[in-house]
Amino acid sequence: MLILPKNYVQTIKNVHKEKGEEWLNKFQDLIKYCEIKWKLTILDPFELSYNFVAPAIRDNGQEVVVKLSIPTNAFFSEVEALQYFAGKDMVSIIDMDINKGIIILDRLLPGHMLASIEDDELATKIAATIMDTLWVKETQSTKLPQIEEREKSLLRFLNNYPEGKGPITTPMLHKATNTFRRLLADGKDRYILHGDLHHYNILKGEKWTAIDPKGLVGEREYDTIQFLLNKLPESDLEPVLKVRIEILVNRLELDEKRLLEWGFVHSVLSTCWSLEESNDYNIAFYKSIFVFEKLHKDKFGRLEC
C-alpha cells in the first residue's frame, strides 16, 4: 500500500473539497487498477504537489511515470496540450484513461532538472530551444484556456482586495490590469503555449525535454515569463533578467517591449496568486515586478498607468 504524505493529502482536500475526499478514498483502488491494466509496479512517488506522480516499472522492464489527477478542467487542458506538443521536445504519452485522470508517460532518464545547470546563460539557451519547438499557432478547435482567464484572475484579486493586500498596492494593481487590457486589445498572433515552462519543468532524457504543460492560448512572449521568474538570486536580479531576456528575444525573435510588459503583469499576478492562498509570497517574483518596470522605462519609457 502506498502511503500518501500528510501535506499532499491536505492539499487535495483544500483544493478539491468533497471531490478530493472522494478521490483520496478511492486512491488505493486506482493504484491497483493501474498496476493491473498496464502490468506495472508503482514505486514511491516523486515529491508531490497537486498531482500524484510516481515512477513505475512494467512487466517487460520498461520504466514509465504514472500521473494521477482528479479529472478537472486543468487535467483535460494538460492532456490536450500534451497532444498538441506530441513529437516535439515534450515528454511522450504512452497511454491514458482520461475519465479516471490517469496518464502513463515515458520516463526521462537520467531525469535531472534544468535547474541543476549552474551556467545560467546555457540554461536559458536550452529553454529557448525547447520553446521554439513547442509553440504552435492557435487552432479554432482548441478548448485550452485563453489568456483572458489570467486577466480575470487579476481583476478578481482587485475586486476582492480593492485596497491591495500585502505588498501589492492598489496603484500597482491598476497599472497591471490596464497593461493587461492594452496588451490584449492589440490582437497579436496567438499560440498554443506550455503555460508553466521553467527550470523545474525541463528534464534531461536523451535530450532536454519539457514536462507538465498547463496548456494556454496566448502570445509567445507571455510563455517566457515563468522561466524568467524562476531560479533567480535573492538580490541583484536585474543583471540576470537582462541577460535572460536578451537571449530569449534574440533567439526566438520576440517583441522585447511586449515581453517586458507581460513580465510586469505576470509578476504582479503571480504574487497575487500566492497572497490569495496565504499571506506568504515569493520574494523574487515580487522584486521582479520592479525590475521589469525599470527595464521597460530605461528602453521604452514608463509603463502607462
Image (tube, rainbow, N blue to C red):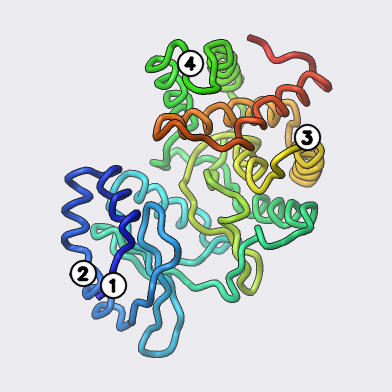
Name the front one of labels 1 and 2. Answer: 1
Residue 181 percent across, percent down from the top left:
54, 17
Q: What residue type is labelled 3?
A: Glu
Distance (Cα) linking label 1 and label 2: 7 Å
User: For the residue carrying disc 2, how many other residues have a C-alpha within 10 Å: few (<14), some (14-19), or many (20+)?
Assistant: some
Distance (Cα) linking label 3 and label 4: 25 Å
What residue is at 60 percent from the left and 47 percent from the top?
Answer: 135
Distance (Cα) linking label 2 and label 3: 48 Å
Report helix, strand or loop for mark 3.
helix
Residue 210 percent across, percent down from the top left:
57, 59
Tell me the residue that label 1 is attached to.
2
Quarter of the rendering occupied by the C terminus = top right
* Rendered position, 118 above or below 255: below
Tell me the residue that label 2 is attached to.
28
Residue furthest bottom as drawn: 60
Q: What residue type is labelled 2?
A: Gln
Tell me the residue that label 3 is attached to.
238
- Determine whether label 1 and label 2 are within 8 Å by CB: yes
Q: Which of 28 and 61 is in front in this view?
A: 28
Tell me the residue that label 4 is attached to.
164
* Rendered position, 222 above or below 233: above
